[in-house]
Amino acid sequence: MTAGPDMDGAFQEVFLCGVTKKDGTEVQFAGTMEEFTPEEGEKDGEGIALGNGGRLWKRTPEGDFEITCKLYPLSIDVTDSEDMVQYFLGGTYDAVAPIVQTNTRNRDTFRVAFMWTDFAFASGATATTASGPTHVSTPGRRLTFKHARVTGYKESWDDKVLSVEVTFKGPAFDRTGNGNVMRESVNSSDGTALPTLKGYTAGTKFPDHTN
Protein backbone atom coordinates (compact mmCIF):
# COMPACT_ATOMS: atom_id res chain seq x y z
CA MET A 1 0.00 0.00 0.00
CA THR A 2 1.45 3.36 -1.02
CA ALA A 3 1.12 5.75 1.92
CA GLY A 4 1.70 9.42 2.57
CA PRO A 5 5.11 10.34 4.04
CA ASP A 6 3.72 10.82 7.55
CA MET A 7 2.38 7.25 7.67
CA ASP A 8 5.80 5.52 7.58
CA GLY A 9 4.28 2.62 5.69
CA ALA A 10 1.60 1.78 8.25
CA PHE A 11 -1.65 3.10 9.70
CA GLN A 12 -0.67 4.64 13.02
CA GLU A 13 -1.98 6.57 16.02
CA VAL A 14 -5.32 7.83 14.67
CA PHE A 15 -8.53 5.97 13.81
CA LEU A 16 -12.30 6.43 13.63
CA CYS A 17 -14.90 4.29 15.40
CA GLY A 18 -18.61 4.55 14.65
CA VAL A 19 -21.39 2.59 16.37
CA THR A 20 -24.88 2.45 14.88
CA LYS A 21 -27.91 1.06 16.68
CA LYS A 22 -30.23 -0.78 14.29
CA ASP A 23 -32.43 1.79 12.51
CA GLY A 24 -30.49 4.51 14.34
CA THR A 25 -27.79 7.11 13.72
CA GLU A 26 -24.05 6.43 13.84
CA VAL A 27 -22.25 7.82 16.89
CA GLN A 28 -18.48 8.51 16.76
CA PHE A 29 -16.36 7.31 19.70
CA ALA A 30 -12.71 7.82 18.66
CA GLY A 31 -12.58 10.99 20.80
CA THR A 32 -13.04 9.02 24.04
CA MET A 33 -11.61 5.60 23.06
CA GLU A 34 -8.02 4.64 23.79
CA GLU A 35 -7.81 1.21 22.24
CA PHE A 36 -9.84 -1.68 20.90
CA THR A 37 -9.30 -5.36 20.17
CA PRO A 38 -11.45 -6.92 17.43
CA GLU A 39 -11.37 -10.72 17.19
CA GLU A 40 -13.05 -12.92 14.62
CA GLY A 41 -14.02 -16.44 15.57
CA GLU A 42 -11.64 -19.21 14.57
CA LYS A 43 -12.29 -21.38 11.52
CA ASP A 44 -11.02 -24.42 13.38
CA GLY A 45 -11.31 -28.13 12.88
CA GLU A 46 -9.71 -31.44 13.74
CA GLY A 47 -8.42 -34.55 12.07
CA ILE A 48 -10.43 -37.77 12.40
CA ALA A 49 -8.43 -40.99 12.17
CA LEU A 50 -9.77 -43.50 9.65
CA GLY A 51 -9.45 -47.27 9.77
CA ASN A 52 -6.76 -47.29 7.09
CA GLY A 53 -4.56 -44.84 9.02
CA GLY A 54 -5.65 -41.88 6.92
CA ARG A 55 -7.28 -38.73 8.19
CA LEU A 56 -10.52 -36.92 7.47
CA TRP A 57 -10.64 -33.21 8.27
CA LYS A 58 -13.71 -32.32 10.33
CA ARG A 59 -14.19 -28.56 10.26
CA THR A 60 -15.73 -26.58 13.09
CA PRO A 61 -18.25 -23.85 12.21
CA GLU A 62 -16.73 -20.36 12.40
CA GLY A 63 -16.94 -18.93 15.92
CA ASP A 64 -18.53 -15.68 17.10
CA PHE A 65 -16.71 -12.36 16.75
CA GLU A 66 -15.88 -10.23 19.78
CA ILE A 67 -14.73 -6.62 20.13
CA THR A 68 -13.36 -5.08 23.34
CA CYS A 69 -13.13 -1.26 23.52
CA LYS A 70 -11.50 0.84 26.26
CA LEU A 71 -13.02 4.28 26.82
CA TYR A 72 -12.73 7.18 29.26
CA PRO A 73 -16.39 8.13 29.89
CA LEU A 74 -17.97 11.38 31.00
CA SER A 75 -21.66 11.91 30.16
CA ILE A 76 -23.73 8.74 29.95
CA ASP A 77 -25.88 10.30 27.19
CA VAL A 78 -24.78 8.28 24.15
CA THR A 79 -25.39 11.24 21.83
CA ASP A 80 -22.48 13.01 23.57
CA SER A 81 -20.15 10.31 22.12
CA GLU A 82 -18.52 9.74 25.51
CA ASP A 83 -19.96 6.49 26.86
CA MET A 84 -21.70 3.30 25.71
CA VAL A 85 -23.52 2.42 28.92
CA GLN A 86 -26.94 3.19 27.38
CA TYR A 87 -26.16 0.62 24.68
CA PHE A 88 -25.49 -1.91 27.43
CA LEU A 89 -28.50 -1.12 29.63
CA GLY A 90 -30.97 -1.03 26.71
CA GLY A 91 -34.49 0.33 26.62
CA THR A 92 -35.29 3.98 25.85
CA TYR A 93 -32.21 6.19 26.06
CA ASP A 94 -32.78 9.19 28.34
CA ALA A 95 -31.64 12.45 26.73
CA VAL A 96 -32.92 15.05 29.23
CA ALA A 97 -30.59 16.21 32.01
CA PRO A 98 -30.10 14.86 34.57
CA ILE A 99 -29.63 11.70 32.50
CA VAL A 100 -31.01 8.62 34.28
CA GLN A 101 -30.69 5.09 32.88
CA THR A 102 -31.60 1.83 34.56
CA ASN A 103 -30.90 -1.69 33.38
CA THR A 104 -33.55 -3.43 31.26
CA ARG A 105 -34.01 -6.79 29.59
CA ASN A 106 -33.74 -5.16 26.15
CA ARG A 107 -30.74 -6.23 24.04
CA ASP A 108 -30.26 -4.01 21.02
CA THR A 109 -28.14 -4.87 17.98
CA PHE A 110 -25.45 -2.65 16.52
CA ARG A 111 -23.08 -2.15 13.62
CA VAL A 112 -19.53 -1.32 14.72
CA ALA A 113 -17.11 0.18 12.17
CA PHE A 114 -13.41 1.09 12.46
CA MET A 115 -11.68 3.25 9.85
CA TRP A 116 -8.01 4.02 9.15
CA THR A 117 -6.82 6.44 6.50
CA ASP A 118 -4.10 9.00 5.80
CA PHE A 119 -5.73 11.86 7.70
CA ALA A 120 -2.76 14.18 7.20
CA PHE A 121 -2.84 14.10 3.40
CA ALA A 122 -6.55 14.24 2.50
CA SER A 123 -6.38 17.68 0.81
CA GLY A 124 -8.97 19.18 3.14
CA ALA A 125 -11.40 16.30 2.60
CA THR A 126 -10.43 14.27 5.65
CA ALA A 127 -12.76 11.44 6.69
CA THR A 128 -14.74 12.34 9.81
CA THR A 129 -16.98 9.28 10.33
CA ALA A 130 -16.17 5.58 10.30
CA SER A 131 -19.01 4.86 7.87
CA GLY A 132 -18.17 7.77 5.57
CA PRO A 133 -15.94 7.91 2.49
CA THR A 134 -12.20 8.41 2.38
CA HIS A 135 -10.50 10.93 0.11
CA VAL A 136 -9.86 9.78 -3.48
CA SER A 137 -6.38 8.32 -4.06
CA THR A 138 -5.71 8.17 -0.31
CA PRO A 139 -4.94 4.90 1.52
CA GLY A 140 -7.87 3.62 3.53
CA ARG A 141 -8.95 0.52 5.42
CA ARG A 142 -12.24 -0.25 7.18
CA LEU A 143 -13.36 -3.13 9.39
CA THR A 144 -17.10 -3.47 10.02
CA PHE A 145 -19.12 -5.84 12.20
CA LYS A 146 -22.92 -6.02 12.19
CA HIS A 147 -25.61 -7.66 14.31
CA ALA A 148 -23.40 -7.16 17.39
CA ARG A 149 -24.72 -6.99 20.94
CA VAL A 150 -23.14 -5.31 23.97
CA THR A 151 -22.40 -8.25 26.24
CA GLY A 152 -20.14 -6.59 28.80
CA TYR A 153 -19.56 -3.21 30.47
CA LYS A 154 -16.87 -3.01 33.15
CA GLU A 155 -15.94 0.21 34.94
CA SER A 156 -12.53 0.70 36.56
CA TRP A 157 -10.92 3.30 38.83
CA ASP A 158 -7.33 2.06 38.33
CA ASP A 159 -4.71 4.82 38.71
CA LYS A 160 -7.52 7.12 39.89
CA VAL A 161 -8.88 7.46 36.34
CA LEU A 162 -12.38 6.32 35.41
CA SER A 163 -12.33 4.00 32.42
CA VAL A 164 -14.61 1.33 31.01
CA GLU A 165 -14.19 -1.76 28.89
CA VAL A 166 -17.12 -2.45 26.59
CA THR A 167 -17.52 -5.80 24.86
CA PHE A 168 -19.50 -6.37 21.67
CA LYS A 169 -20.22 -9.91 20.51
CA GLY A 170 -22.08 -11.40 17.57
CA PRO A 171 -22.39 -14.34 15.18
CA ALA A 172 -20.15 -14.77 12.14
CA PHE A 173 -23.20 -15.06 9.86
CA ASP A 174 -26.88 -14.09 9.93
CA ARG A 175 -29.58 -16.74 9.87
CA THR A 176 -29.56 -16.96 6.06
CA GLY A 177 -25.78 -17.41 5.86
CA ASN A 178 -24.71 -13.87 4.96
CA GLY A 179 -21.42 -12.76 6.53
CA ASN A 180 -21.49 -10.28 9.41
CA VAL A 181 -17.86 -9.11 9.13
CA MET A 182 -16.53 -6.99 6.24
CA ARG A 183 -13.08 -5.61 5.42
CA GLU A 184 -12.38 -2.96 2.78
CA SER A 185 -9.27 -1.19 1.57
CA VAL A 186 -7.98 1.14 -1.14
CA ASN A 187 -4.44 2.14 -2.14
CA SER A 188 -3.30 5.64 -2.99
CA SER A 189 -2.69 4.39 -6.55
CA ASP A 190 -6.24 3.07 -7.06
CA GLY A 191 -7.76 6.43 -8.07
CA THR A 192 -10.82 5.72 -5.93
CA ALA A 193 -12.01 5.90 -2.32
CA LEU A 194 -13.76 3.81 0.27
CA PRO A 195 -17.49 4.45 -0.24
CA THR A 196 -20.10 5.42 2.34
CA LEU A 197 -21.88 2.65 4.22
CA LYS A 198 -25.67 2.55 4.13
CA GLY A 199 -27.75 3.07 7.25
CA TYR A 200 -27.92 -0.04 9.42
CA THR A 201 -31.27 -1.83 9.28
CA ALA A 202 -32.37 -5.42 9.89
CA GLY A 203 -32.13 -6.24 6.18
CA THR A 204 -28.72 -4.65 5.54
CA LYS A 205 -26.29 -7.11 3.96
CA PHE A 206 -22.59 -6.76 3.12
CA PRO A 207 -21.42 -5.03 1.05
CA ASP A 208 -23.80 -2.27 2.15
CA HIS A 209 -22.49 0.76 0.29
CA THR A 210 -24.65 3.61 -0.90
CA ASN A 211 -23.21 3.37 -4.42
Image (cartoon, rainbow, N blue to C red):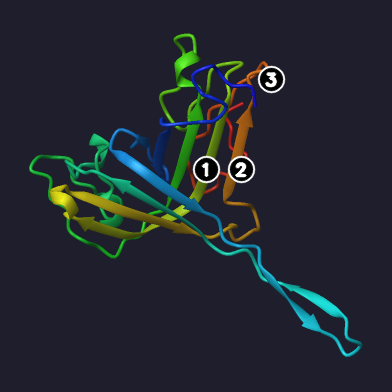
Tell me: residue 175, above or below residue 94: below
**Cα distance between the residues tagged 3 and 2:** 22 Å
Disc 1, SS: strand
Residue 77 relative to residue 131: left or right = left
Question: x, y percentage for residue 22?
Answer: 42, 46
If you read the primary sequence from the N terminus, does the residue marked by circle 3 or circle 2 appear first? 3
164 and 21: which is toward the camera: 164
Tell me the mark number nearer the camera, choosing from 1 and 3. Answer: 3
Q: Alpha-carbon neighbours of circle 1 within 10 Å: few (<14), some, or many (≥20)?
A: many
Q: How many callouts does the rendering have?
A: 3
- Residue 186's x, y, as percent? 63, 27
**Residue 156 pos. (x, y %):** 20, 56
Q: Which label sits on residue 144?
A: 1
Q: Is residue 126 visible?
A: no
Quarter containing the C terminus: top right
The residues tagged by marks 1 and 2 sit, at their Cα atoms, a distance apart of 9 Å
In the rendered structure, which amino acid carries the disc numbered 3?
A: Asp
Q: Earlier in the sequence, mark 1 or mark 3?
A: 1
Q: Is residue 84 above or below residue 31?
A: below
Residue 182: image quadrant is top right
Looking at the image, is mark 3 or mark 2 nearer the viewer? Answer: 3
Q: Is residue 1 left or right of residue 35?
A: right
Residue occupying image coordinates x 22% and y 49%: 163
**SS of the residue under disc 2:** loop
Residue type of the residue flagged with mark 1: Thr
Asked if disc 1 and disc 2 are in contact, CB closer than 8 Å, the reply is: yes
Number of the label disc, if any, that sits on residue 190: 3
Q: Nearer the viewer, residue 111 or 9?
A: 9
Q: Secondary structure at mark 3?
A: loop
Q: Which residue is disc 2 drawn over?
A: 206
Instruction: Please name whichever residue, 110 or 130, is drawn nearer the observer in this view of the structure.
Output: 130
Identify the amino acid type marked 2: Phe
